[in-house]
Amino acid sequence: MFSALLRPKSAGDLARLGVLLALAALILFGALRYDNFISPFNILSCLRYNSMFALIALGMCFVIITGGIDLSVGGVAALASVVSAFASPYGWAAGMAAGMAAGLAFGLLNGFMITGMRIQPFIATLAAMLASYGLALLLADNQSVSVSYDTAFTMIGQEDLLGFPIPAWIALFAFVIGWVFLERLPAGRHVLAVGDGEATALLMGLKVRRIVFFVYAASGLLAGLAGTILAAQFGAGQPTEGVGWELFAIASVVVGGTLLTGGAGSVGATLAGVLLLGMVFNVLNFENGLGWISLSAYWQSVIRGLFLLVVVILQARISARSPREAS
Amino acid sequence: MTITDTSSAAPTVRKLSSLQLASRYGTMLALLLLILFNLAMTPNFLSWQTVNVNLTQVAAIVIVATGMTLVIATGGIDLSVGSLMAISGAVAPMIFLDTLVPIADPVLAVALAFVLPILVTMAFGWFNGMLVTRYAIQPIVATLVLFIAGRGIAQVITNGNLQVFKNPGFQFIAMGQIAGIPAQVALMLVVAAAAFAVMRYTMFGRQVLAVGGNEKAARLAGIPVRRIKILVYVISGALAGLAGLVVVARNSASDANLVGLGMELDAIAAVAVGGSLLSGGRANIIGTLLGALVIQLVRYTLLANGVPDAAALVVKAGLIVLAVYVQQRADRS
């Protein structure tokens, strides 16, 4: 990845270079313009909050690389937050395991619907999203479920370890595993091959169904983890939270230069995409703090949409110039 | 590639398998079963009020889903419809409440409140179409831009404030009655009938199906693929705008945070249950109408029999999967 950044060879590399440059430019802009922008407090709280989105975007990145989509992640995260809140009196490990198990269960369900019943990913995961919200609301009786403060459960979302927020450690750990998997292991190549063309991958002797099944299971597991962090961070399982997370995750992945057609993608650039979209909100807050303008929080989504627009148009321009991805 | 209209009941010599029968008439059958079940189980089901409640609940979804059916028929998808509803719902009250500019003539103000918001959402639909055609951006991503930014635009222009109003002229679209039928239900039927006629009897309808069936072949056959695609997104935008007007008129209030929230998924679900597969090349307008009715009636049946709303969501999910599964199996056999 790093050599590719120095000498971009393909459209995808260029797009990934673009998102890193944009992120660097935004950080530089913030650092020069606002006093406390690069203060440890701001950076750490930004990372703490965005770690949930990072985990979901990582799973989405793998799903999109295979040419699929996972609309269920927001609902699954909401369900996992409720489940982990119920399990939190039995300790942080139990809460975490329960949340991840709930996520994994829905990931397996998605994998089964898509590979076993051969339902299009869009429809299958849309149904899973409705079902997970329904289950979350049923379990929680339409209310938020307070987590236990007697155990160490809330530390998963609120505490620091070695001066770094624990949720950010979790996200970092997940991204390292994801990077090693995609860039260094044969299985990662297989995921890319499936996205490049299922027929070809089948002819190469790859177990396409098993690979597709695996990415949805992984996406569910990561959404479950994100939901656990959500519950720990806000002290409650929230059955109505997570609305629109799936689309935010898709936007982050796309901004990170991963094409929705599959076959190419980068874990690192996805992380940059999450940070870029997350930091827009942060910069907006600081800009309001200066007092010269007063942009309401509603501008956040307008500006995010504009970001996405600029990025996808640039991507379209780049890939129009070099139609073959030399990956 | 499927250019044949599956909703036509033309007599076929070939005997249909039970699976294909289920696929073709399943939605209709489900609707009939639901009605029979309710007649037996739900007290007061056969009342004008129940019919009205269910039809008015479904009107906005059907209007949006009709546009979505056309977009999906070309192989695309439109995620921006909910946000476009919020925009039209935000703009219309600003016009007749004189928030923007004072308009002396109240009739003119109401007329403008119908026309301008829809023109605005049509422009956004055109924008979606341009991204999809000119920049060759995948429809999911292209319409994701306005899904994210559109609601923000509606919130910014209203500053997130609730607009409450009472304007009988404007609210006729939801509260009024035409020959005893609620105006929004009549509107829904008109929209669905018009779309059905367009898809069945016009060249444009055939071209839409051709584009979705096989884009390359359609281009080689001389069909203006780009123009057709842009047009379906403009239509989808217009219908989303109309649905936004219906919803705010029904509520006597416009809340940019809530109008049309989640509508894209409701509309897609109605299309999928109604038998137009997401792969394109098929547009079953009647199916979409029935699909929306089935989803609504399932929810009503469960609620009327004491099942919580959350459980209805789970049932709805199962229904979508089942409907699509049966159709796909039938397609393959």
Image (spheres, coloured by chain):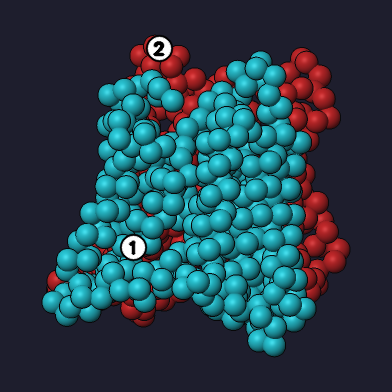
Q: Is residue A35 left or right of residue A269?
A: left
Q: Is residue A18 left or right of residue B58?
A: left
From what the image shows, is residue A96 above or below residue B215?
below
| In-front residue for pair A322/A161 | A161
The residue wearing badge 2 is B221
Q: Position of residue A69 (x, y in %)?
A: 56, 43
Q: Amino acid at mark 1?
A: Met
Q: Which chain is cyan?
A: A
**Numbered circle sitting on residue A279:** 1
Quadrant of residue B222 within the rendered picture: top left
- Outermost residue on the right side: it is B40
Q: Nearer the viewer, mark 1 or mark 2?
A: 1
Q: Quadrant of the N terminus of chain B?
A: top right
Q: Position of residue B41 (x, y in %)?
A: 85, 66
User: Is disc 1 in contact with disc 2, using a CB cutoff of under 8 Å?
Assistant: no
Asked whether residue B170 appears in the rendered view, the answer is no
Q: CA distance from mark 1 to mark 2?
A: 48 Å
Q: Are marks 1 and 2 on the same chain?
A: no
Q: Residue at x 56, y 23 (%)?
A: A197
| In-front residue for pair B177/B244 | B244
Q: Residues within 10 Å of mark 2 (few under 14, many from 20)?
A: few
Q: Position of residue B193 (x, y in %)?
A: 51, 42
Q: Is residue A122 left or right of residue B78?
A: right
Q: Circle 2 — which element?
A: loop
Q: Residue at x 38, y 38 (%)?
A: A2
Q: Chain of mark 1?
A: A
From what the image shows, is residue B122 above or below residue A286?
above
Q: Amino acid at mark 2?
A: Ala
From what the image shows, is residue B175 above or below residue A266?
below
Q: Which chain is red?
A: B
Q: Residue at x 69, y 88 (%)?
A: A150
Q: Circle 1 — which element?
A: helix
